[in-house]
Amino acid sequence: MKLKNTQALTSFRYGWLLKRVFPYIKPVLGRVILGFLIAIPVGLLDGVVSFSLKPYMDYVVGKQNLILWGFEIQYSVIAIAMPFAIIGFAVFQGVLRYINSYLTDWTSFKITNSVKCDLFARLMYMDTSFFDENNSGIVINRYLNDPDIASRGIVDQIKTIIISVFGALSLIVVMVYSSWKLALVGVVVLTIAFVPVFLIRKKIKSVSNKNIVIAGDILTTMNEAYSGNRVISAYNLQDRQIKLFNEGIDKSFNVSISLTKRVGWMSPLMYLIASFGIAFVLFYGTKLIYSGHMTPGSFASFVTSLLLLYKPVKTLGNTMSSIQNIFVSLGRVFELFDYTPLITDKKNAIKYVCLDNCIEFDNVNFSYSNENPVLKNINLKVQKGETLAIVGNSGGGKSTLVNLIPRFYDVTSGAIKFDDTDLRNFKISELRSSISFVFQDNFLFTGTIKENILLGNPNASDSELYDVIRASHLEEVIQTLPDGLDTMLGERGLTLSGGQRQRVAIARAMIKNAPLVILDEATSALDNESEAVVQKALDNLMKNKTVLVIAHRLSTIKNADRIAVVNNGEIVEIGTHNELISIEDGQYKHLYEMQFREKEEVIS
Ligand SMILES: Nc1ncnc2c1ncn2[C@@H]1O[C@H](COP(=O)(O)OP(=O)(O)O)[C@@H](O)[C@H]1O
Ligand SMILES: [Mg+2]
């Protein structure tokens, strides 16, 4: 799946999305509901202030005593009490607001975090081709930033909606109480003012989808600035990278501003429609007062409510567009949840991987995409305990061939078998446990050397650890390091030399002690001197194991039991060194003369 091609098809299926996000809300549901309940009085208290204007105008300004339930209250008492009451209400509302924000943030973080953790767990089990297809930026953006927008916003926006709706309701009640005729006008105008909000949601979705891709590209450029910094410096690529970055930023600006262009008129338009309403109300209200149908207090109350109403209504307008954004993000998040990796365990996967006789490639064909076959009709048997060297032209398919064994990719047709059992029947984690893989460019994790080695087998004893360190010729390296085994490696282990990194990787493979060893050009990136040391380490790793080794070094190849020549996706020759060398015009003989002999002379 290409993450760039997001459609977020489910974005407008609000009910469906809420149902899917509900399991994440459920554990904190109590607090979410409490937060929502508290939001109600916070909103309602808005109406209190405007309502209080009525008695103030009618009794205090009009110097009349209020008769309430048979008691007469002096207007001067009202005059003194009201300011205090207003402050009291503000304090009360403030406390409620605080509790409400706390609850909202707490629950939002919890929900977002569990969505993120679940997504990361899914990402960890994605297949290799997923990582081939998608660059780092888009992965980070969609797996880390999108869930933030999606789930953090939900609770917050619902809270805002509740506060605004109840705020608006309380103000409308005050308005109706003051004059139902005027209130009717107000409500009609408001309803009209809301129409534009629903017209723009498609645009919001398309902009949001574009933006996530652009932001991904920007992040990728940022990542390259980090991991490619030496190449950038060496080839003076700074300006190129700066240009790439600026282009991303510009694109994101254009996309966002195009949304503002379409959406920006909404708020002024709503304001304009509202001003018509207010103008009409003033006109009509004056008439009602002069004709004695309304007290000036009621009118003041009404107009204040109407003006105060603007804020919750505007907030609701904004919330509506934010909510669209959230649902688009949610749609994208659940798109990720619905993507199942291409390579997964079968239902009744076999939990014990055994390799007693041989590994067999049975008529294996493979292509990365559907067009170009990379491996064609591969038939191959490697006996247990045998060492098979694989040589051939660059791009011929050697790495692809060995990558099929741990199921980084699955065969397009045919099958690979351990003792007659198709690999696809094994539990993937068990299959991979039975293989020690050393790559050409091995990844080391941020952490100490010791931690990196023990990743191969966290339960290894100290004596096993020291055996492995000796066998991988790491002893002398570790002795020179200030903190020895506990030396921290920088990100990707870059503080070690190539040969040293490779030996740490070999130690990691060795401590795993898997029956099958696969080496993909494990020494080819090294200079002659470190190659010789690493080779010794590899020889130790290969002892008593079944080994597939892609190599360019003659001694490795010569010592192998058999050699397979893979050219352009086919095994063109297979046999011992002596057999192959005696084929007149043979491919191996040709390779040998071109490459190995020359290299061998340099090394020895
Ligand atoms: N991840 C990939 N996605 C698509 N094509 C690939 C991928 N890896 C390798 N290829 C292609 O497959 C062919 C064989 O590559 P590879 O197995 O790496 O060759 P070798 O290891 O023999 O040099 C090449 O044409 C290469 O371009
Ligand atoms: Mg290769």
Image: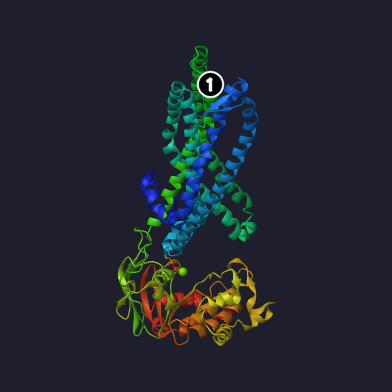
| Location of residue 337 (image quadrant) | bottom left
User: Which residue is at the far top?
Assistant: 291
Crowd class of label 1 (few under 14; some 14 to 19; many from 20; radius 10 Å)? many
Quadrant of the snapshot with the C terminus: bottom right
Q: Position of residue 304 (x, y in %)?
A: 55, 26
Q: How many marks?
A: 1
Q: Is residue 285 above or below residue 524?
A: above
Q: Is residue 471 above or below residue 143?
A: below
State the residue at coordinates (57%, 44%).
Answer: 97
Q: Nearer the viewer, residue 514 or 188?
A: 188
In the rendered structure, the answer to whether residue 413 lies left or right of residue 459 reads: left
Mark 1 residue type? Phe
Quadrant of the snapshot with the N terminus: bottom left
Q: Nearer the viewer, residue 544 or 57?
A: 57
Q: Is residue 521 above or below residue 331?
A: below
Q: Is residue 94 above or below residue 383?
A: above
- From the image, tell me which residue sits under label 1: 299
Q: Position of residue 536 (x, y in %)?
A: 55, 84
Q: Nearer the viewer, residue 61 or 560?
A: 61
| Location of residue 577 (image quadrant) | bottom left
Residue 153 appears in the rendering: no
Q: Position of residue 466 (x, y in %)?
A: 58, 85
State the residue at coordinates (59%, 21%).
Answer: 64
In the rendered structure, the answer to whether residue 588 lies left or right of residue 56 reads: left
In the rendered structure, the answer to whether residue 237 lies left or right of residue 583 reads: right
Residue 256 appears in the rendering: yes
* SS at circle 1: helix
